[in-house]
Amino acid sequence: MIIDCHVHRYPEKVSKDPVAFAESRGEKHWLQLVAPKGKASIQGWANGSEMRNDMEAGGVNKVAMLGWYWENPETCFEHNRWHADWLKEDSEHFLAFAATHPLGGNQSIEDLKRARDSGFHGIGEIMPTVQAFSMQDPEWRRIVEFAIGEDWPVNFHVSEPVGPPHAGRIPTPLEDFQWLAETYPELKIILAHWGGLLPFHELNPFIRETFGNVWYDVAASPLLYDSKIFRAVVDAVGEDKVLYGSDYPLLLYPRIQKNPDFESYLIEINESGLNQRELKKILGENFSDLIGLPKENSIHEA
């Protein structure tokens, strides 16, 4: 079984007119990413049926729909309502993480409780820089403690600290994740996009011990790194800490790709030099164990 731990899904009202949606809700950062001025967008769109068709074509069995790191709490609440509705329609193929914002205070906690009762499995993506809060903010720490109580992982959007300029590369203080991992060793932390290459710091024995509760997803890797990164990171931290995610429906190969798909990236991963044991863990087993899927839904040999 293959599980993609990092996809995004939006309703038709958003995909038809993302500019109007973003402007009506004051979501300037998201708009900059999906509809950049003066250049082509790499944002693709897919409804539930299209996503399932692409999953079948790529051999993907389940996907985890992530919330976005919205700038306003109300947009987080709205996004979670979309996810709850889609889980009611199809919980066989779709899992859900909750969008959240500490500026929502008690409303954010109550919304997370509703997400829990709707069958969600975690929180994220989160990005403190865009969402304008500190990792040590008391309201954010309430959310962290809620996640610990539910045994939920939290997925963070992490930008690479160096590289070509692009709208998604927002400064991300990597020290914040060290503080979080040290302060809340019970919290399951997922650092998206290879954690901005933070896994290589685990070659330091102190960080390796501190980061026992940290995993790295590989979403959007073709836009950022050479495929050699798979072998390099697995050699640095082990296959148990790497999670397959695509960032579907993002166009990961924009020079040759007109429509989103799962298959292209999975081909790259399978040709990246990993052995079958490593692929089995990364492509689904690790994430299944992390979110506690029942054993009958976990990875098994065909």
Image (cartoon, grey):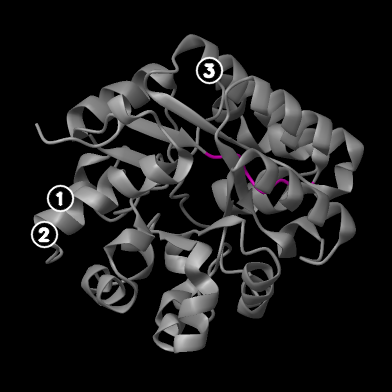
How crowded pointer 2 is (Cα within 10 Å; few <14, some 14-19, many 20+) is rated as few
Residue 295 at x, y = what percent?
32, 30
Name which of mark 3 and mark 2 comes first in the sequence.
Answer: 3
Query: Which amino acid lies under the numbered mark 1 shown in the image of this protein?
Result: Ile
Residue 15 at x, y = what percent?
54, 29
Label at residue 104: none
Q: Nearer the viewer, residue 12 or 173?
A: 173
Snapshot quadrant of residue 253: bottom left
* Residue under numbered circle 1: 267
Judged from the image, the secondary structure of the residue bearing numbered disc 3 is: helix
Query: Which amino acid lies under the numbered mark 2 shown in the image of this protein?
Result: Glu
* Residue under numbered circle 3: 86
Label at residue 271: 2
Left or right of 71? Residue 83 is left
Residue 125 at x, y = what percent?
60, 49
Judged from the image, the secondary structure of the residue bearing numbered disc 1 is: helix
Magenta stretch holds residue 233: no
Magenta stretch holds residue 70: yes
Q: Is residue 8 visible?
A: yes
Q: Which residues are magenta?
A: 66-71
Residue 123 at x, y = what percent?
62, 43
- The structure residue drawn at horizontal position 43% and vertical position 25%, both measured from the top left corner, is 94
User: Is the C-beta separation of discs 2 and 1 under 8 Å?
Assistant: yes
